[in-house]
Image (cartoon, rainbow, N blue to C red):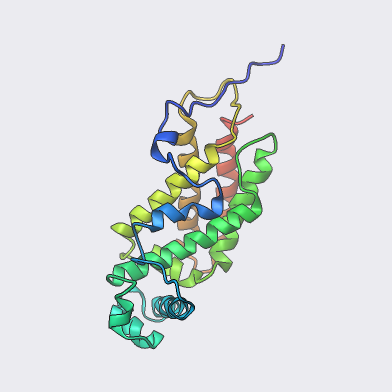
Amino acid sequence: MAAAVRHPNTESGPTLLAYPDAPTRLRDLMQPIARHAGASRKAIQARSQDKVDKVLTATNDLLVSAGPSGVTTTSVAARAGVSVGWMYNFFNDREALLEEVLIRGLVDLDERFEAAGFSLAGPDWRTTATAGIDALFDFMFNGAGIAGFRLLWFSTEFSGRMVQVNRSHDDALAAYLCRGVTALRPDAPDIPFYLVAQTFIGMLDKGFDIAFRTDPNGDKTAFSETRRAAVAYLETFLT
């Protein structure tokens, strides 16, 4: 007789409560989060959009050339060729500039996740989970403005509101990954699947941290071990 299949516990977990209006597409995960961090408003006119892009390019360039301490509203405005007064129309302070670098990096990452078909649902979950992990690794090497993103991640400036932005993104991604998961192993630990998804994402974050902490080019062995360990963890729960 075939073993009974368990259904994931999400209703009693925080999944639905934490993100009742979570976007249904990976590429949109940052939309509700970005309303409370980074730029204070969106540039509508093409000319303003171009200036905002120059401001963020300047912020990335300064992160790489001078580190986070070299990013000030004055230095960014001078490098971008805009006035400090104009910049304050969109960024309240230097932390908002750094947050926007983080936000844009995470948006790029989510677009890569979506293109890779990142999912934990269905019988081919190992393939789609691994595709998502590989999309993360590709982002770490080739993402838009990734040099500035990595420098920010490992700096003492990565605190406060920026940490909250990253945590909110991880939680939104965990909620998204719970969707479509309909069956668990009969011997899986009895915990909400939202917690499983959060733990899985935490493993990927830590793998990134380990891979780049001492090797600016990224330790390939650390990446391989992160992939193996993360999939092995999911195998404890998914059929």
Q: Quadrant of the C terminus?
A: top right
Q: Quadrant of the N terminus?
A: top right
* Left or right: 93 in relation to 223: left
Which is more toward the observer, 231 or 15? 15
- Going 60% across and 24% down the picture, which residue do you hit? 185
Q: Is residue 176 above or below residue 109?
A: above
> So how many labels did they put on this image?
0
Residue extending farthest to the right is 1
* Left or right: 14 in relation to 108: left
Residue 104: give x, y in percent of width and height: 47, 65
Which is more toward the observer, 167 or 134? 167
Which is more toward the observer, 9 or 212? 9
- Going 61% across and 48% down the picture, which residue do you hit? 118
Can residue 74 be seen from the camera position used here? no
Residue 10: give x, y in percent of width and height: 48, 29
Residue 181: give x, y in percent of width and height: 59, 33
Q: Is residue 212 above or below residue 196?
A: below
Residue extending farthest to the top is 1
Can residue 163 be seen from the camera position used here? yes
Residue 101: give x, y in percent of width and height: 42, 68
* Left or right: 38 in relation to 31: left
